[in-house]
Amino acid sequence: MATSSEEVLLIVKKVRHKKQDGALYLMAERVAWTPEGKDRFVISHMYADIRCQKISPEGKAKVQLQLILHTGDATIFHFTNDNSAGAAAKDRDAAKDLLQQLLPKFKKKANKELEEKNRMLQEDPVLFQLYKDLVVSQVISAEEFWANRLTGNSVDNSASSNKQDIGISAAFLADIRPQTDGCNGLRYNLTSDIIESIFRTYPAVKQKYAENVPHNMTEKEFWTCFFQSHYFHRDRINAGSKDLFSECARIDEKGLKTLVSQGVKNPLVDLTSLEDKSLDEGYGTAALSSSKSNKESSNAAIIRRFNHHSAMVLAAVLRKQETQNDQNSENNSTDGNSRDSDFFQPPVKKVKLQEAIEYEDLGEKNSKKTVALNLKKADRYFHGPTPVQSQHYASSQDIINSVHCIQQEMANYSPSLAQVLSSNMASSAISDLSPGGVLMQGASSQAINQIMPSDVQMELKHLYVAVAELLRHFWSCFPVNTPFLEEKVGKMMNNLERFQMTKLRPFREKLQKLYISTNLTGHLEDMLQVAFSKFHAWQSKRMLKKT
């Protein structure tokens, strides 16, 4: 079942899988199903492993939910709640809506992991061949293969690198083109990227979403109200008081006035001087009349709305930069006088002038390129290696005395060669044991790499790499002191036996067909037998403890 630290978001009972009744659990990071009468999950899928979900069409006899994984496998759940009319459909829709909110959060993480896996397989041909030998041939699962490979330098490098956010298009609202549904209605297709862009550009809409979804209305009803409101359409002049987003419009008007009052930070730009002047009487020097027609006022309202939209798009990016700068300033401030550094900053006008007249490409490059030192464990760098225990070191006088003793022993050395062979007998023995001698008639004088074909050598190399990978997983389970390790060591034992049957024995039969008498698989079989003996010994001790 779920662990004590795992948050259960939704439990749906009377959910059938393969004609077996059970309950569906939606948790913070995975979806799981358990049959009735059992206390453990039979099916468990991480949200990052789910590619998409599908539901059965309305009017169908069976109310079903299908989860399609990135591997291509699919799991179908049948909702059988018959307490009331449409109860099964309500349970299915509740699970579907919650999955619709959770899956986009883990989609980017899954895509990132898949890109990292593809990069590792493309850059390492040995790893790619190992993946084909073990995963494609179904000796071990993909999760077991990638268990310890994504926790190394690749993940450290990806975690240390800064994430680059996707920018917001100024026309993202215009790109949402409604489609007719055939019943005098309009249908808007919203993706997770469009919703994120709306939330980043208009924080007031995000606040309304958090206040009303899913407490007061569903997500579909919320976006229907959004596209029907005066906040989205036209120039917001006639915003009704009953509109859900009327408060958002007032907040935006207040924010626009604040932006206008702040003005432009660039002292070299004067926006007040940018006015349209016609060359009539006075040649542009006469005062213009302040009277404006209704058409001009409506155009000004539209331009005002466009300017506000552009300002909100830019503010969404600036908010991200400000948060990063605040974090950097907090990390860099090591004493209480960090705020005094603002006093020594150059004026804004001076900075703008320097940017206008100085070019980095034309300047002198005296700075040397340095490489940043990436320390995983800073304690070892600052303190250095420390001895485990105190050791006795010899002095220089002890070393000199030892050298004198060795010299005396060598001077008084007298060899005793009474029990050795004569030179003639030794020469005869060497010639008999050399290639082509009397005792070496059955052996070949050629090396093994000269006898074996190149494809057999490559296949033998791949077998050694695959066996080493399987044995690494197997021996990492010892000592077996947790239920997880007990389950894993049993799986790895089955994987070793499957590898011996599907890979090692066919290779040995292939060597026999090629009339190769050299036993090339003996070392591989010995390593497997040692693992089998270890497993049987551990299993016998386990049975004795139970009895």
Image (tube, rainbow, N blue to C red):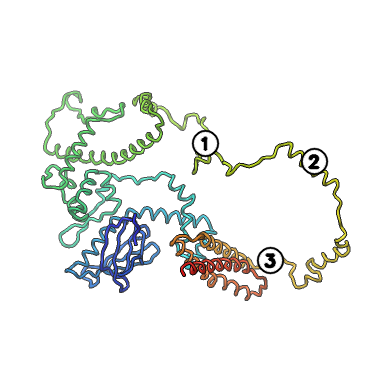
Q: Earlier in the sequence, mark 2 or mark 3?
A: 2
Residue identifier under label 3 = 448
Is 266 displayed left or right of 485 in the figure? left
- What is the tally of numbered marks visible in this picture? 3
Residue identifier under label 1 = 370
Above or below, 512 against 11 in this view is below
Q: Earlier in the sequence, mark 1 or mark 3?
A: 1
Real-space CA distance between mark 2 and mark 3, rounded to the nearest whole angstrom: 50 Å
Q: Looking at the picture, how far across and down is residue 290, in whole percent?
A: 13, 29
Q: Looking at the picture, how far across and down is residue 225, in whole percent?
A: 17, 52
Q: Give the secondary structure at mark 2.
A: helix
Q: Nearer the viewer, residue 528 or 40?
A: 40
Residue 49 position by quadrant: bottom left
The mark closer to the camera, 2 or 3, is 2
Query: What residue is at 46 percent from the left and 56 percent from the top?
Result: 117
Query: What residue is at 78 percent from the left and 70 percent from the top?
Result: 440
Q: Residues within 10 Å of mark 3 (few under 14, many from 20)?
A: few
Q: Looking at the picture, how far across and down is residue 307, in whole percent?
A: 23, 38
Q: Nearer the viewer, residue 395 or 179?
A: 395
Q: Looking at the picture, how far across and down is residue 293, in whole percent?
A: 11, 36
Q: Give the secondary structure at mark 1.
A: loop
Q: Give the secondary structure at mark 3.
A: helix
